[in-house]
Image: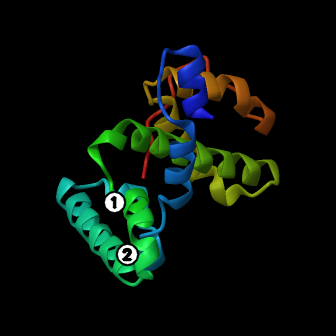
Amino acid sequence: MLVLIKNKLYDGNLNAERAAVLAMYHDVPEIATDDMPTPVKYSDPKIKLIYNKIEDQVIEELILNLPEEFKEDFCSILKRKESDEELWKIVKYADRISALVKCLVEKNLGNKDFDKAYKCIEKNVLEIEAPEVQYFIKTFLPAFGFIYPEREVGLCKS
């Protein structure tokens, strides 16, 4: 949806179908590595670099273990190409929005365990300076009970 918004409203020219495929497979390396919490992954550039190298090794191994006739197909999906950088950025935005929606759903169910995560994720999403993200937040998130803040979002405390 973010790519469609970008293309239709903000003069984008991106392939929405490619973005959807990248989004579907973006967490494949976590099959082997599990999901490292975002605050840890991004707390130090060295950690992020090491984690990226591990993910690259996982992808290489996954592709090596595929039947020969599927290797090329999955190389084009799992291995990041410079030509897809803008799409990967949007996939990351969508992933953050998805985490925010998960927190909203849990909060609406009365689950207070997501309150702290919600505050951090909300701040993170609202700081994304992409018009397609801001449009999505204002247009679609109210259906989940989200109220766009008219104030500065407070600092996220870990």
Q: Disc 2 versus disc 1: distance between alpha carbons?
A: 10 Å
Quarter of the picture containing the N terminus is top right
**Which residue bears the numbered disc 2?**
63
User: Which x, y percent locates residue 8?
Assistant: 59, 18
Image point (35%, 71%), residue name: 59
Query: How many circles with numbers are drawn on the protein?
Result: 2
Image point (61%, 48%), residue name: 98
First of labels 2, 1 by sequence position: 2
**Other residues around mark 2 within 10 Å, as few (<14) / some (14–19) / many (≥20):** some
Please name the amino acid that badge 2 sits on.
Answer: Ile
User: Which x, y percent locates residue 86?
Assistant: 38, 36
Q: Is residue 142 visible?
A: yes
**Which residue bears the numbered disc 1?**
79
Secondary element at tag 2? helix
Image-based side of 110 in relation to 50, left or right = right
Q: Is residue 96 visible?
A: no
Q: Are marks 2 and 1 in contact (CB under 8 Å)?
A: yes
